[in-house]
Image (tube, rainbow, N blue to C red):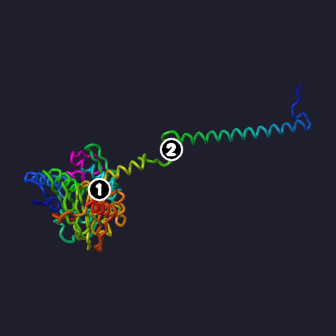
Amino acid sequence: MPRSIRDSGSSAPAGRVFAAHRRARLAKGGLVAIGLVVFGSGIAATRATVAGHSRRALRPLTPPALFVRIVRQDALRAGVIMPTQAPPSASTAQS
Amino acid sequence: MSSRFSAMGCEVCLEGASAAVFEAVRDLFARRDRMFSRFHRDSELCRVNRSAGRPTPVSREFAATVRVALRVAGATDGLVVPTLGEALEAAGYDRDFGDLGGDRGPVRAVEPPPSWRAIRLHGRVLRLPEGCQLDLNGVVKAMTVDAAVVMLDGPGWVSAGGDLATRGGIDLDLPGGGAVHLATGGIATSGQTARRWRRGGGWQHHLIDPATARPARSRWELVTAVGVTCVDADAAAKAAFLADGVGPGWLDRQGIPGRFVSLSGAVEQNRSWQAQMGSAAACT
């Protein structure tokens, strides 16, 4: 007939029980920590990648700076002037 | 032989126009004046301004003008914008320039206008943001000068106020002294001493700073700029005036010649102006 551990009365089985309890506590702690890490990573990955879940400030799509510069140069283009070649025949006002 | 008439609150001069072209140009100015006037309640501009906040169908010509005005706003980093109708009225420019008369009380305070970027134009459907009142006068005048010079039969020029465009080149005197040969394109001068009026005990002028919605404070009395078209020249001159001390450098970055006359009368030419005048002199 098997004896219960509590009935054993010897110190060696009590030490094994204590060690087993300690391993169990460590295992539970480890499992909880892993669970938290997995859960946190999942939330972060979801917020970063799933449309509509981003908490970062939205950034408008911007064209490359070179493109903007070229368009701007094209928008205002310089005329051509040179020193007068004859007495001026007209004058400009200001507006 | 030059011919002239009055339109858009200024004198329009033509050189090299036949009688038929003169009539056509006068009709063009008159039609655009009616369409874009802030002072005629039945103008298309007033109709559009009354419908701010909701989509409004506009004519093809109106849409094209708004498109140019938005291009100018972008090219000038938001210095020359079409959203200053309310600010101009608040400063006292609420009727034809010739009818402004003497001081008619204090300047009305207004908030800075909505951003020009909030204007939506899809084809011929325009939507202004709430509270936005367009003023397209500057762009319209320059565009009309550009259109008129194309109508000339041969070499000649067209000027309206401070805007001038040429075909075939012209030697001309500049405001504030000096002279230049404009080989091609347009030249425009904007300043604070010609189109001004008294209000609230002080002088007001039509060059509004979009950041404050008030007539701009600038160290320049007037700025002259040269563009491939009159629209480009006018936009560049206004932007350089509004940019104040950095105006010459700003024009240089665009490669546009600019001539600045300060309030004390001192004349400053930016590097692009000096380069063009210098290189041309070196070639002759």
Q: Is residue B42 at least partly visible in the picture?
A: no
Q: Is residue B57 magenta?
A: yes
Residue closest to the eye, B242 or B132? B242
Q: Nearer the viewer, mark 2 or mark 1?
A: 1
**CB under 8 Å between discs 2 and 1:** no
Kind of residue indicated by mark 2: Ser
- Which residue matches tag 1? A78
Sequence order check: which comes first, mark 2 or mark 1? 2
Q: In the image, is residue B106 above or below residue B148?
A: below
Q: Residue B103's spot in the image, x, y percent?
A: 21, 71
Q: Which mark is residue B165?
A: none
Tell which subunit mark 1 falls on: A
Residue closest to the eye, B163 or A31? B163
Magenta range is: B42-64
Quadrant of image for the C terminus of chain A: bottom left
Number of disc labels: 2
Q: Residue B94's spot in the image, x, y percent?
A: 21, 62
- Which residue matches tag 2? A54
Answer few, some or many: residues within 10 Å of disc 2's Cα (few below 14, many 20 plus, some between 14 and 19).
Answer: few
The CA span between labels 2 and 1 is 45 Å
Residue name at image x 32 percent, y 54 percent:
B73
Residue name at image x 20 percent, y 59 percent:
B164
Q: Residue A32's spot in the image, x, y percent?
A: 69, 40
Kind of residue indicated by mark 1: Ala
Answer few, some or many: residues within 10 Å of disc 1's Cα (few below 14, many 20 plus, some between 14 and 19).
Answer: many
